[in-house]
Image: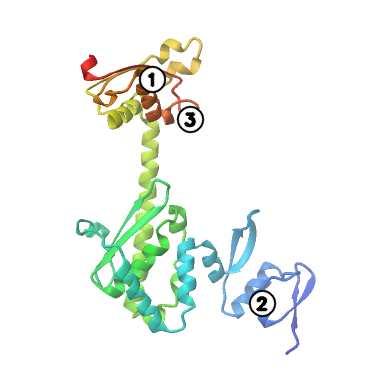
Amino acid sequence: APRAKPVTCARMKTTALTSRASRTSSSSCLPCTSTRRARFARDGLELRKVRRGPEKKNTWLTTAQAAATEMPNALKSLVTAFSAVPDPMLRYKQLLHFAEKLEPLAVEHQTPENKVEGCVSQVWVKGRLEEDGTVTFQAESDSQLTKGLAALLVKGLSGAEPEAIVSLEPSFIEMLGLKQSLTPSRNNGFLNMFLKMQKITQELASSAGSAGSDARNIPMSKKIENALRDNFNPSSLDIQDDSASHAGHRPDSADGGTHFRVEIVSDSFEGMNTIKRHKAIYGVLADYMEPSGSIHALSLSTKTPAEV
């Protein structure tokens, strides 16, 4: 084996023996940043600094290593699987298999606003934000190969949080090893699909933020009304905010939202005694009650239409 050459770091004033094979691995005595950058550049690699591990320490990785670290788990698994297949034709066949398994996008969603521009074939992508904060995608195309590419992105990105999708670098496309199997126009179309998904995700996240802000500005009386109407379909509903009358012993009640009188008439109460009716209402309004919400007390009148 050839003798390893010493690499001297002026900043650390120390010498570490390194060989070409060990240049991408860590050493007990690492050269300074400028030395490492120069060494990796000589090997055709680029260094990036990322924060990783429980203590979020800075770590220098190659661009490919950093991209793999930051990928959603589902996408990381796909990249690993595709990059391990040496035969381009097998990768091509796998894309066609993905196309067959892709859940179709309804025709009413194949609209201009969902269409991916810059693709050889027609492609439509739609996303939705789930209750757990993750994003789910659907896609459709009039070409089986393009549909397979879309399916790969749907499988890899669905279930990830918006931040992970928006911040994802497109370098993973190169890591999939599909470049040799696709024409330049197909490769460009694949990138455009990914960028469209990022744009959709950004819009979903922004809308959710606006909706959350609007929800915080809705008066508590209106929130109560919406919840009761959705769950009990009342024939009569009256809600009074009595919070101000309790401000003497509870100063924060002066601004309202803590004490309410609710009179509700609904067929939903048929066959239920008063205790069960009250429990049903408290269950619906649980998120608005203390300690998670602002409601301190509710005075309830619950009747069926026959009891009015």
Q: Are marks 1 and 3 in contact (CB under 8 Å)?
A: no
Q: Which mark is residue 23?
A: 2
Which corner quadrant of the image does residue 307 belong to?
top left
**Structural distance between the alpha carbons of marks 3 and 2:** 54 Å
State the residue position of label 3.
292
Quarter of the image for the C terminus: give it: top left
Of badges 2 and 1, the one in the foreground is 1
Q: Position of residue 147 (x, y in %)?
A: 30, 70
- Give me the residue at 38% from left, 49% from top: 130
Q: How far across and how far down the image is residue 229, in percent?
A: 28, 28
Vertically, is 68 above or below 130?
Answer: below
Q: Amino acid at mark 2?
A: Arg
In the image, residue 180 sits, relative to residue 285, either above or below, namely below
- Say which residue label 1 marks: 275
Check disc 3 and give the amino acid type: Ser
Above/below status of 168 relative to 243: below
Whether residue 240 is visible here, answered yes or no, is: no
Is residue 78 in view from this perspective?
yes
